[in-house]
Amino acid sequence: MRLKHCHNTEQFRLLAKKRLPGPIFNYIDGAADDEVTYRRNTAAYEDCDLVPNVLAGVESIDMSTTVMGMKLDLPLFLSPTALQRLFHHEGEFAVARAAEKYGTMFGISSLGTVSIEAIGEAISTPKMFQLYYHKDKGLTRSMIDRCKDADFDAIALTVDTIVGGNRERDLVTGFTSPPRLTPKSLLSFALRPGWALNYLLRDKFELPQLQHYVDEGTNIKLSISDYFSSMLDQSMDWRAAEEVASHWGKHFCLKGVMSVEDARHAVDIGATAIMVSNHGGRQLDGSRAPFDQLAEIVDAVGDRIDIICDGGIRRGTHVLKALSLGAKACSGGRWYLYALAAAGQAGVEKALENMKTEIERDMKLMGAREVADLGRANLRFR
Ligand SMILES: Cc1cc2nc3c(=O)[nH]c(=O)nc-3n(C[C@H](O)[C@H](O)[C@H](O)COP(=O)(O)O)c2cc1C
């Protein structure tokens, strides 16, 4: 299978599986406990149907939306994800440049493998930084200050990783950051020599947002779940989030809000957006899917804050369904990570092209000339 044959997320997934050593593929593909929430995140979209309008004169379609004051050419953006240079040597640059080409936003993780500064210099379109609130307050502050200097547009504070999720696939494979070289993992690397050569011969693996503060994840091997449990501050509360927001002073988003009560609280502390998200099912298995929870949150605070539906997106129609319920935009990780692993920047561009084509075609079929034309009347639950 080749890149040009990847017409949908599942085909990218299969190509990623062929290219990546098992532990790394399973780190992307896996989730918490029995992965019930992970499966529901996508299945939730299948519980309702689109009701199209016709004869709407749809020769030209405007797919743009405005999130946190930023105009995005597509109502879908690329959620922040960790360790991207492990998936493909082009890493965050590939993701950022592809997003720039398609005029949409991307997020850089606190556990990113390219620095805030390098991305700030390379990219002129909307940039989000994802903040993990560390026990080391100097580190947390330094990341916010570096985002200010690099002229990032928004910070998303992740609030659903107060401890690490139980990612059992990682327990089985022994996945750590950086990858641990055991006889078993060495074998999986040897079976993927293309990946192994790139990993060994290209720029050394590092986590530049953490440099000078912590060795864990770079010089000390650790699973990502253990990283959350040992390095992040479990005393983080609303006051802490408010302090981050005011220290940052620009657009501020809470990533991982699921309850109406918390969504209201987000408005109270001056957040300009929330990502309704369960971290792609990687944290609390058994928690509700973002799409299932969306309407409640839109009804409560949709007129006061931008609501992003994060996770489970595999098709353009999923985006249309979330927009119909009142989300301002959708975001996701795996839909572009499989493509990154499959073919670097060219892969992410192809994934974006596929989604753009689907969203445009589906909007035309729905009789929607712009995102605002989509509403609850376009959706029926079975
Ligand atoms: C491999 C991987 C790494 C991730 N790393 C981060 C991260 O560093 N910070 C964060 O807030 N979310 C992270 N996420 C969660 C994503 O931002 C997003 O919420 C999730 O992928 C949405 O689910 P989806 O993959 O079904 O789209 C990660 C997700 C994946 C799959």
Image (cartoon, rainbow, N blue to C red):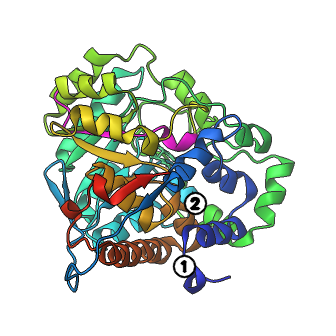
State whether residue 187 is above or below residue 159: below
Classify residue 271 by image quadrant: top left
Residue type of the residue flagged with mark 2: Phe
State which tag comes first along the sequence, 1 or 2: 1
Q: Is mark 2 within 8 Å of ligand 1?
A: yes
Label 2 neighbour load within 10 Å: few <14, some 14-19, many 20+: many
Residue 311 drawn at (x, y percent): 47, 49
Q: Which residue is mark 2?
A: 87
Q: Residue at x 51, y 62 (%)?
A: 314
Q: Which residue is mark 1?
A: 7
Whether residue 77 is visible here, answered yes or no, is no
Label 1 neighbour load within 10 Å: few <14, some 14-19, many 20+: some
Residue 107 drawn at (x, y percent): 35, 51
| Kind of element beneath mark 1 | loop
Q: Is residue 112 left or right of residue 119?
A: right
Question: Residue 377: which disc?
Answer: none
Q: Is residue 221 left or right of residue 112?
A: right
**Residue 340 highlighted magenta (yes or no):** no
Residue 327 drawn at (x, y percent): 29, 49
State whether residue 43 is above or below residue 251: below
Residue type of the residue flagged with mark 1: His
Residue range (magenta): 270-281
Q: Residue at x 48, y 67 (%)?
A: 90
Q: Residue at x 29, y 52 (%)?
A: 376
Q: Residue 16 versus residue 312: which sits nearer the camera?
A: 312
